[in-house]
Structures are given as C-alpha cells and as structure tokens.
Amino acid sequence: MKKTIKLFSLLMAFVLTFTACGPKEALSKEEAIKLSDGYVQCIANRDYETVVANCRDSVKKQIDAAALQQAWESVAGTAGGFVSATATNFEEKSGYATVSTVAEFENGGFIITLSFDSEGKIRGIWFNFAPEDSVYQPIDTDLLTEETVLIGEYDIKGVVTTPDNMENYPVVVLVQGSGQSDFDETIGANKPFRELAHGLAQKGIASIRINKRLYQKPALAHEQLTIWDEYMDDIYAAIDYAKANISENVFVIGHSQGGMSAPKIALDNDLKGVVMMAGTIRGLEDVILDQNIAVLNAMDISDAEKQRQLKAVQDGVDAVKALTEATAEPVLGVPARYWLSMRDLDGENILKNRLTVPVLILQGEADFQVYMDKDFGYMQSVLGDKENIQFKSYPGLNHLFMPQSLPGVMDVTEYTAENHIPQYVIDDIAAFILE
C-alpha cells in the first residue's frame, strides 16, 4: 500500500527518509550539484512524480508523489512563483553526496537538501525555511553583546548573548523543536530564539543558542540516526561550554521537541531549572497522529481518501510503538533508531519522580501543533500537584508564542509573515529564572 503521509511534526522542517546500504564511491561535486539542480527545478514546478521516480527503491517504499507534495506544501504552500536557486553547500561522507540549495520564491526562501548514492539515486530529502541572512552578524549595543562560538566535536555554530554592564548573571541554553533549524530557530520571517536571547539579555540573563547538527552538516545524516546524533550531544556540549565560560548557574529553555527534551537535559546536567515552551510528555508519534487527523479533516478530499491516509499514519504510529532493538527499517520515513532514542527522554517519569528543580511549562492557547487539552492539559493533570512545577498559558498565541495572525489556518503558512514574541512572555520567563 502506498503511503501518503503528511509528517507535520512539532516544528516546520522535514526529513523525509533515511536509507541503509553499503556505499560505494560518491558522486563528484559537479555530478551531485547537476542532479540536485534538476530535482530542485522539479520540486519548484510541482513535478513530484519525477523526483520520486529517481529515488532508491527503499525510499519509494516510504514515500510517493502525494506524500512528497504534502510535505513540500506544508513548508512552502504559499511560496508563490519560483525565482531562482543556488547550490550553497556540498558534502561527501561515507560514499554519499549531499547538496543543499537555497530556492528563492516570491514569498520566501527555502532550503532543499538532497542526498544521493553512488548511482545518483535520491536517498534523502530535507525541506527547511531558509534564514533571511546566510551569515549572522552578532550585534554589540549598550544593552547586550553577542559573539559566535563553535561547539562540540563537529564545530557546530552558535551565538552567546550576554547582558552588558552586569556580572554574575545566569545563562540559558536554548533547544529548538523538531527538524533542522539554525540557531535563531528561523521559521519563515521569524526568529524566535533571537528574540528570546535579546529579550532575556535585557533582563540580565545570558544565553547560548546553536545550530541543529544536520542543518549545518546534512551529510552527517545516516540510517542509524538518533536524537543524540541529531542534537542532544551538541546541547550537552553547549552546556559544558556555558558552565566553563559563562556561568555555572545554567537553565534550559526547550521549544516544542526541545521542550520534550528539556527535563532529560536538566536531569543529566544538574541544571538549575527548566522552561518548557509548547512541549509535551506524550510520545512524538501520538502528537503526529493528532496533527494529521486535524490536517486531514481540513483538507478538501473525499472521506474515503481521508480514511486511507489516516490509516497509513495510524499504521505508522502503531509500528513506532511496536519497535524493538531488532527493527531495521525506517518508520514514517524516520530511522527506527531515532524513534527508539526518543524513549530516552522519559518526560513524564522524570518530571513526576526524579527532577526536583523548578520547572515552568508554557503553552500558547492558539497552538495547532501541540494541544491545550491533550498536551498542556494532560501535563497539568499528572503534574499539577508538584510544588516545583508552574503552568501558564497565553490566549491568542500560536506555537511560536507569537500572536495568531491567520485564525482557522492549520499549517505553517501562519509563520510566513513577520511576527514577534510579546514582551509579557519574555517577562514571565525572566522572572522565573531570576527567582
């Protein structure tokens, strides 16, 4: 049965597939860029069939043209007409060639990354919003200072923001949501992590924010990828850097999947406190199922087609829950090892029984990706008696903790227009940390 799965996920980026096979000699840079240019043009022209036809057989088992279309339109549904494309990065690792291209459309830029095997077949596709600027210029004002840093064994780029004319300030480590994003967590025209860093610095709180590893180095993706490979090891390295160079008074702020991860991060690293923004203690697969149900209900397709697609997602979710260490094949287009590593987060148990530091759980009431009832409400029901845990929700704020701009719209077009985190959200976070 073909799969037409809309992998909406907790944040707006997609890794459609990883595959396994013993690699041979990689394509040359010229060959890989030529292939990538052609397939980017196909995606820009909505010719999804050609792209899928040139995928490896193992990839075709995970996606079809309809699934590719849904994934692309979830990121770029209102992109407008195609303008231009420029290959910006080539990497070769373990016999695979990976090319990242910035594709400019009328209403925004997007990064399309393709990975090829030695025969030129597509083995992976990534879609991301493109940052507005390719090189970050740290600012230096009378309120705060910023410097770029390199973190961990892969020299992941990051930015340290410190308040000026102050000493002995705490520091927060910012952890993005799912998908591959830059250190600002750039979503369309919005940079929520930059806003948080600048706003907190003006309140006397330093921060460090870093790229997701596969955003910076997509060639490091592999068929055994885990959350530790993707971001957790780099976050732990950022914490070590913060303790050694900024302050030993370290907090973690996690957004979306980063919020899911924050309790585990705090427990393992002896941090002073946790802020979960649009996080959850449910399984990621359960959230994906609910997101797909909502999206399918809003789609103008027949009931039979809705049921077919929903069954495909439900089958994938059931497969995730049944995973064992012996499972090798990807599930829902994601490596089995990744799903298994998500179990390491163990959020409900950690928050209920193991973590004693202060925790602040925040939720936007207009969030259509993490839910007031099933996520925020569930956490209140099972953790509400914990004296170290506080809850707060904000009417009218979406998944990025920005005012909802398109009521009734349930896709990431909500984030294409410039928006901002209200000062009262930053004030609440700062007050919690400074207590």
Image: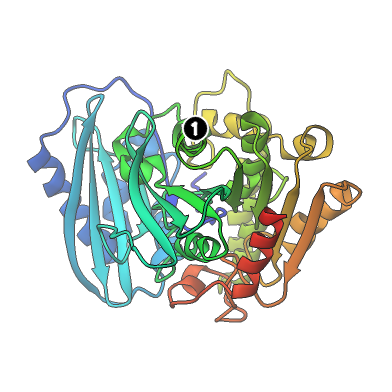
Q: Pick whichever, 228 or 426, lies toward us.
A: 426
Q: Secondary structure at mark 1?
A: helix
Q: Is residue 226 visible?
A: no
> What residue does disc 1 label?
240
Within 10 Å of disc 1 (Cα), the crowding (few <14, some 14-19, many 20+) is: some
Rendered-image quadrant of the C terminus: bottom right
Q: Quick check: 51 left or right of 372?
A: left
Q: Pick whichever, 249 or 212, lies toward us.
A: 249
Q: Residue at x 39, y 75 (%)?
A: 78
Q: Pick whichever, 85 or 366, lies toward us.
A: 366
Q: Amino acid at mark 1?
A: Asp
Residue 355 occupies which quadrant of the picture? top right
Q: Residue at x 33, y 23 (%)?
A: 21
Q: Quick check: 196 left or right of 72?
A: right
Q: Residue at x 67, y 41 (%)?
A: 272
Q: Position of residue 11 (x, y in %)?
A: 52, 56
Residue 157 vs 300, above or below: the answer is above
Q: Position of residue 133 (x, y in %)?
A: 27, 64
Which residue is most to the right?
385
Q: Quick check: 45 left or right of 316?
A: left
Q: Residue at x 68, y 33 (%)?
A: 267
| Count of numbered circles in the view | 1
Residue 328 vs 263, above or below: the answer is above
Q: Is residue 165 visible?
A: yes
Q: Position of residue 89 (x, y in %)?
A: 20, 46
Q: Position of residue 123 (x, y in %)?
A: 32, 37
Q: Quick check: 223 left or right of 274?
A: left
